[in-house]
Image (cartoon, coloured by chain):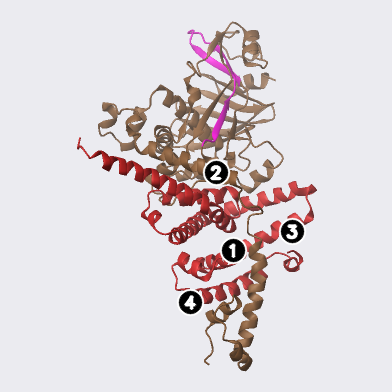
Chain colours: A brown, B red
């Protein structure tokens, strides 16, 4: 009998074609090969058994999975017949415009624009992915972003446009939707009678500004105190729409876990108070602001890191912007601050020992300082000199 | 609108209802085994569930649903494995960043398991080593090993992988040899390979 091939020898271990015994007695080479195959199989069997799930799904699990599948089938069927439900294009969007896709932003209604604005904030906040350092730091934290410091993200006009286009399309196509935007007047500030009322509305102390540090020509008392209450907005992630979006945009093999579907991105926008001081001409000359910290969290099947990864990997986002966001070490406590490079110059600075960022507009007349301290975001801005702005900032305690 | 005989409309409705029932029946029959395959490859319950869902979405309306059960089963296994492989390739493309994140997550898991039996930690490490060794194999060898050691017959493996039955033994022999080399070269504690069932 000729030597059996490797496959026949292996099959013999599993009870395959068996008349090999006589040959094996006579052929030491085949006997050795079979012994090796036996050893390999005996090593593989218990090892590979370790990869099996501890418990197979029960009947209830199977029925629940079938129900989820039926829901997905229904959603997909609805999505295929849904184009008529999308906002009707206005003449402005159907006319060929510069940049092509830019016109889509014009289709967004008021709610959609509000959603886009919050989503843009979320994109910036998520600043996007879990670095090893970030993950390690996160092990002791809540899975939640809390801004404690700033990181400037420079955006030229083209990059800013592209980020805007991506965000608009995500809202336009239903990848993110936000029912919370039904609230009317969201983001509109109200005028507080005085600092006490502003403190009550915001929930934190509103500092008095020492008139002695105010620049010349600026009135000693605030002309107006504007308060924007804290609010929370929720953006719901639709996995199937996201997959459609990714596949339409050059990612035919895109995959997203089913559990991501329906996850809510919770954007906690802080209360903000701005004291507005007038100059000699009665117009606003100096703004002194204070806010709580921005927060971001994810509720549902996807974690914040995972959604951050999805957002950072979105096709269309400028690579340089994504690289800047990825370079942030501790993204959970660092607020990316988008700065338009064609409008503003910036440099790092200090306010009472806290890291700050100093901004100057292209005219050189407007200066601003932004810093975070004691769980609050602070800002001073106006038609003042850099040193004058810093004097006011340092006086705020 | 074109008028159709009432019986034809009734037949069509009946066919659709029959297809839905058939689909649900196949789902109930095959869910567990496909879930097991997905889990063996991916090592994550959520990912395994996703793969099975994707697989059945592809079955929805596919003509193979009208074929005999064994052909449907082989088709489902093939699609399930391909879907899982696509997912693994996507994960690889997501690069070392995800690997680092995964290691950090495992480290956290292991830290969290402080009160768990040491055995659980060792078992988790062994599972990682096994999956790492399997991942180094060509996809067909890997699928062949998983299917055989999950109890599938040579005929079922051949149907799933679109092979001649006679080729399964060779694939299995080469796969087990490659697995042995990769597994014993892995960074898991070599002694641990013999320590646990």
Q: Position of residue A262 (x, y in %)?
A: 52, 35
Label 1: which secondary element: loop
Looking at the image, do the residues carrying marks 3 and 2 touch, with CB atoms under 8 Å apart? Answer: no
Indicate the chain on which mark 1 is placed: B
- Distance between the Cα atoms at labels 1 and 3? 22 Å
- The circle on residue B166 is 4
Residue A373 numbered mark, or none: none
Residue at 53% in and 79% down: A7
x and y percentages locating residue A127 in the rendered image: 55, 38
> Which of the labelled discs sits on residue B122, or is there none?
3
Q: Residue at x 28, y 33 (%)?
A: A97
- For image coordinates 51% across by 28% down, the residue present is A360
Q: Secondary structure at mark 2?
A: helix
| Labels 2 and 4 positioned on one and the same chain | no
Identify residue for label 1.
B150
CA gap, disc 4 and disc 3: 38 Å
Query: Looking at the image, do the residues carrying marks 1 and 2 touch, with CB atoms under 8 Å apart?
Result: no
Residue indicated by mark 2: A63
Magenta region's main secondary structure? strand
Residue A275, position in %: x, y? 58, 13
Name which of mark 1 and mark 4 comes first in the sequence.
1
Which residue is more in the foreground, A113 or A178? Answer: A178
The CA distance from mark 2 to mark 4 is 38 Å
Q: Are marks 4 and 3 in contact (CB under 8 Å)?
A: no
The chain containing the residue under callout 4 comes to: B
From the top left corner, tell me how far across and down residue A68 is, in percent. 51, 41
Q: Is residue A30 left or right of residue A178?
A: right
- Give the foreground label among 1 and 2: 2
Point out the image quarter for the C terminus of chain A: top right
Is residue A289 a member of the stretch shown in magenta?
A: yes
Give the label, 3 or 2, closer to the camera.
2
Whether A74 is drawn above or below B183: the answer is above
């Amino acid at each position: 009998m000729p030597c059996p091939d490797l496959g026949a020898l292996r099959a013999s271990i599993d009870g395959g074609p068996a008349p090999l015994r006589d040959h094996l007695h006579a052929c030491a080479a085949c006997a050795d090969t079979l012994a090796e195959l036996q050893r390999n199989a005996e090593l593989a069997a218990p090892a590979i058994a370790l990869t099996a799930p501890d418990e197979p799904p029960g009947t209830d699990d199977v029925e629940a999975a079938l129900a989820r599948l039926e829901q997905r089938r229904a959603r997909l069927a609805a999505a295929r017949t849904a184009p008529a439900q999308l906002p009707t294009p206005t003449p402005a969007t159907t006319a060929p415009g510069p940049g092509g896709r830019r016109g889509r932003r014009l289709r967004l209604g008021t709610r959609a624009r509000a959603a886009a604005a919050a989503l843009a904030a979320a994109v910036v906040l998520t600043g996007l992915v879990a670095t090893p350092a970030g993950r390690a730091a996160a092990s002791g934290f809540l899975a939640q972003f809390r801004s404690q410091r700033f990181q400037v993200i420079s955006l030229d006009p083209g990059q800013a446009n592209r980020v805007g286009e991506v965000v608009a399309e995500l809202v336009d196509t239903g990848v993110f939707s936000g029912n919370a935007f039904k609230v009317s007047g969201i983001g509109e500030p109200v005028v507080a009678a005085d600092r006490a009322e502003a403190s009550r509305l915001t929930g934190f102390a509103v500092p008095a500004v020492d008139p002695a540090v105010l620049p010349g020509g600026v009135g000693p008392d605030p002309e107006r105190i504007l308060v924007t209450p804290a609010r929370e907005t929720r953006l719901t992630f639709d996995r199937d729409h996201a997959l459609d979006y990714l596949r339409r945009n050059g990612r035919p093999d895109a995959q997203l876990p089913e559990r991501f579907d329906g996850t809510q991105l919770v954007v906690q926008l802080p209360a903000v108070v701005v004291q507005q001081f007038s100059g000699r001409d009665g117009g606003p000359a100096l703004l002194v602001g204070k806010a709580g910290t921005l927060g971001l969290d994810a509720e549902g099947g996807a974690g914040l890191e995972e959604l951050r990864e999805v957002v950072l990997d979105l096709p269309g986002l400028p690579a340089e912007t994504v690289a800047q966001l990825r370079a942030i070490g501790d993204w959970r406590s660092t607020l990316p601050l988008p700065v338009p490079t064609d409008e503003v110059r910036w440099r790092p600075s200090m306010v009472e020992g806290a890291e700050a960022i100093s901004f100057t507009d292209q005219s050189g007349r407007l200066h601003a300082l932004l810093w975070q301290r004691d769980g609050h975001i602070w800002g001073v801005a106006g038609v003042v000199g850099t040193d004058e702005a810093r004097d006011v900032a340092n006086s705020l305690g | 609108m074109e008028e159709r005989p009432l019986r034809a409309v009734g037949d069509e409705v009946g066919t659709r209802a029959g297809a839905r029932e058939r689909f649900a029946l196949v789902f109930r029959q095959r869910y567990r085994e496909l879930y097991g395959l997905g889990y063996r490859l991916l090592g994550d319950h959520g990912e395994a569930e996703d793969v099975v869902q994707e697989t059945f979405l592809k079955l929805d309306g596919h003509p193979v649903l009208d074929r005999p059960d064994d052909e449907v089963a082989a088709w489902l296994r093939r699609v399930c494995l391909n879907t899982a492989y696509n997912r693994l390739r996507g994960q690889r493309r997501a690069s070392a960043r995800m690997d680092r994140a995964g290691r950090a997550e495992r480290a956290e898991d292991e830290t969290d398991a402080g009160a768990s039996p040491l055995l659980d930690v060792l078992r988790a490490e062994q599972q990682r080593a096994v999956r790492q060794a399997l991942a180094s194999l060509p996809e067909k060898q890997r699928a062949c090993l998983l299917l055989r050691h999950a109890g599938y017959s040579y005929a079922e493996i051949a149907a799933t992988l679109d092979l001649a039955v006679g080729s399964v033994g060779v694939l299995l022999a080469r796969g087990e040899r490659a697995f042995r080399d990769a597994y014993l070269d892995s960074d898991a504690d070599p002694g641990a390979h013999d320590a646990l069932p």
